[in-house]
Image (cartoon, helix red, strand yellow):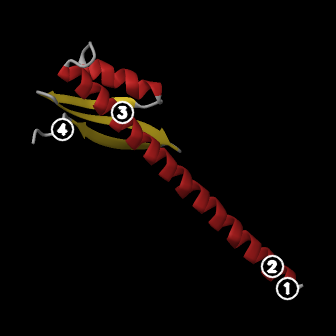
Amino acid sequence: MAGTVASVGVVACLASFAVGFAVVGGASVAGQRLAGAADAAALAAADAASGAVTGDPCARADEVAAAVGAQVAACDVDRLVATVSVEGSFAGLVLRASARAAPPPSL
């Protein structure tokens, strides 16, 4: 009987660890997806600011972020440098990522 109780305790402990690791893994994936969305949105805004594509830079950033399920929280364009912050959620938590894009420096 004591062995059964110990076995059930070990299985319950391992199951709780597995659930915890799955949640942490899911949050990590959501964070990386959000970082990718921020990068893409900043690149889109920088392209619009440089004239490579038409349109308002922050509107372009919003279009790109929305395509991957994120929302633009902040968009700042200073000359050709675009800084974009996007927000998303995971398990009821708000996640935020930022990125900056600009033309390469001249040599």
**Amino acid tagged 4:** Pro
Marks 1 and 2, how far apart in space? 6 Å
Which residue is the site of mark 4? 104
Q: Residue furthest right?
A: 1
Please name which of the two marks, 2 or 3, marks the residue nearer to the observer. Answer: 3
Depth check: 1 or 82 in front? 82
Which residue is the site of mark 2? 7
Residue at the spot x=30%, y=18% of the render? 59
Marks 3 and 1, how far apart in space? 55 Å
Please name which of the two marks, 1 or 4, marks the residue nearer to the observer. Answer: 4
Q: Is residue 104 above or below residue 24?
A: above
Identify the element where label 1 is drawn.
helix
**Amino acid tagged 1:** Gly
Give residue 62's position: percent from left, percent from top.
34, 23
Q: Residue furthest top?
A: 54
Q: Residues within 10 Å of mark 4 (few under 14, many from 20)?
A: few
Q: Residues within 10 Å of mark 1 (few under 14, many from 20)?
A: few
**In the displayed structure image, the side of residue 28 where residue 83 appears, left or right:** left
**Amino acid tagged 2:** Ser
Which residue is the site of mark 1? 3
Which residue is the site of mark 3? 40
Q: Earlier in the sequence, mark 3 or mark 4?
A: 3
Identify the element where label 2 is drawn.
helix
**Amino acid tagged 3:** Ala
Q: Is residue 107 above or below residue 81?
A: below
Identify the element where label 4 is drawn.
loop
Q: Earlier in the sequence, mark 2 or mark 3?
A: 2
Q: Earlier in the sequence, mark 4 or mark 2?
A: 2
Q: Are marks 1 and 4 in contact (CB under 8 Å)?
A: no
Q: Residues within 10 Å of mark 3 (few under 14, many from 20)?
A: many
